[in-house]
Each structure stands twice: as C-alpha cells, then as structure tokens.
Amino acid sequence: MKKYHYSLLATLILFLTACATPRIDTGDLKADIKSARSGHYGQAMLHQELSEEDLEVANTILRHLEKNHYWNIDEKQKALDAAKSAARHRLESEKEMCLWLTEVHSQNHHKGEAIHDTVAYFKTGSSVPFKTKDESISKVASWLKAHPDATAIVTASTDTVGKPAYNQDLSEKRANALVQQLVANGARPNQLTVKAIGEVAGLDNTPDQENRVAIVITSHPNYIDCPNVK
C-alpha cells in the first residue's frame, strides 16, 4: 500500500511541477529560423543541408552493405531513394543559388530596348557629317563602355549621285567617321562593326538627304546566370 501511495505522490509531484513551469514562447525563435531560410540564398542553404542529410543516409547504408552487416533488400532501396533525393535537393539548391546570383548581378543584366537611331547626316559626296546627334552618340558610347560584352553596328549609305563604286567607298568612310566619334566618347573599337551599304536604290543621279546618313544599332546580349542549370 505504501508503494502505491509513493507512486501516486510522485505522479502528483510531476504533474504539479509541469503545471508550475511556465510554457516558453517560441514564436520569435520560429520566426528567426524561418527568416534564415527565406530568400533564394536561404533556400539554397536549406536544400544543400537536406541533400547532405540524404547523402549521409545513403553512404551509411552503403558502408553497411559493403561490410555485409545486413542483407535487407529494403535497406538498399532506402539508400537508393536517399541518393536520388540528395540529387534532387542539390539541383534545387543550385537553382536557388542561380536565382540569388541573378539578384546580386542584376546590374549586369542589360535592360531596355536596343538603340536604333540615325545619328549623322552628310552632304553629297562628303564623308564629314554636317549634322550629328551628339547626345545619342554619347549615350551609345557610354552604354558600350559600361557593357564591354555589348556591340553595335554602324551602317552608312549614300544617294545615287556619283558612280556606284565611288559611293560604296564613300559609305564606308561615313561609317568609319561615326566609329571614330563613338570611340572618342568611350566605346571600344572591337565593339563596333562597320556596314557600308553604298547607294540606296532610287532614281539615278538623284540627291536624297534621307540616304546620306549613318545609323547605329546596338545589340544587347542576353545575360543569364547558370544557363546550364535547368
């Protein structure tokens, strides 16, 4: 009977102790843990940890199998499933890391439409522009300077006044004149390609200011972080 009373008393003490101990609020701790896993970088860390845990399971079973510690076929399947799960988590980690890199490298991702603008005008037979859009030339050159992997095509043409062969050479000189201005404003020569059109089709020996021009067209490369991670 005494043993029964002692057992009842011990149970009562444990119950009263549990009731007397205040329950600790863990809401803030859960919030901080969740915060640490937020964002692409946090998710990348989480998937990496899960991958390592799965790999540990697979490697432990592998060691046991190789040492003939047990012959349970289900254990081998468990290891295979763990290894596949580890590979999936690793891939998810890489994807999240690439998304994080995209955020970090956002300044490298070229935004905005490509520039396509007529920036220089020439008189008949001249390779020296009498009018230029200096603001546009400066903008293009500055953009090319800021993005070394970007390029631009400089196209020039002539009207039908003069011989075709002469006008072909003239259009090349006009394009090169614009290239010099772009380089002077900061563009690199290897970013620029000259396209000499020569005469634009029309009535023979007819002056046409619309065709005595130089045009610049920029090319924005598609910057992609981790293009092989899918």
Image: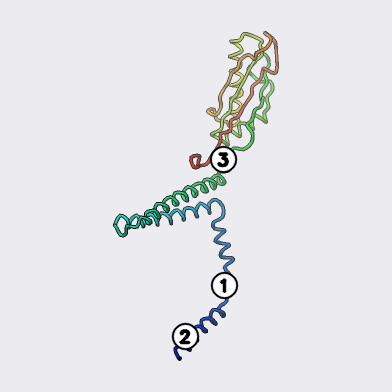
Q: Amino acid at mark 3?
A: Asn
Q: Position of residue 229 (x, y in %)?
A: 49, 42
Label 1 vs label 2: CA separation?
29 Å
Residue occupied by mark 1: 24
Residue occupied by mark 2: 7
Label 3 vs label 2: CA separation?
72 Å
Residue at image point 56% right, 52% down: 39
Work out whether 110 lies above or below 153.
Answer: below
Task: Say which of 11 and 170 sits in front.
Answer: 11
Q: Which mark is residue 108?
A: 3
Earlier-in-chain disc, 3 versus 2: 2
Helix, strand or loop at label 1? It is loop
Q: Amino acid at mark 1?
A: Ile
Q: Position of residue 90 (x, y in %)?
A: 46, 49
Task: Say which of 73 and 35 sits in front.
Answer: 73
Of labels 3 and 2, the one closer to you: 2
Q: Which mark is residue 50?
A: none
Badge 1 density bin: few <14, some 14–19, many ≥20, Cα 10 Å: few
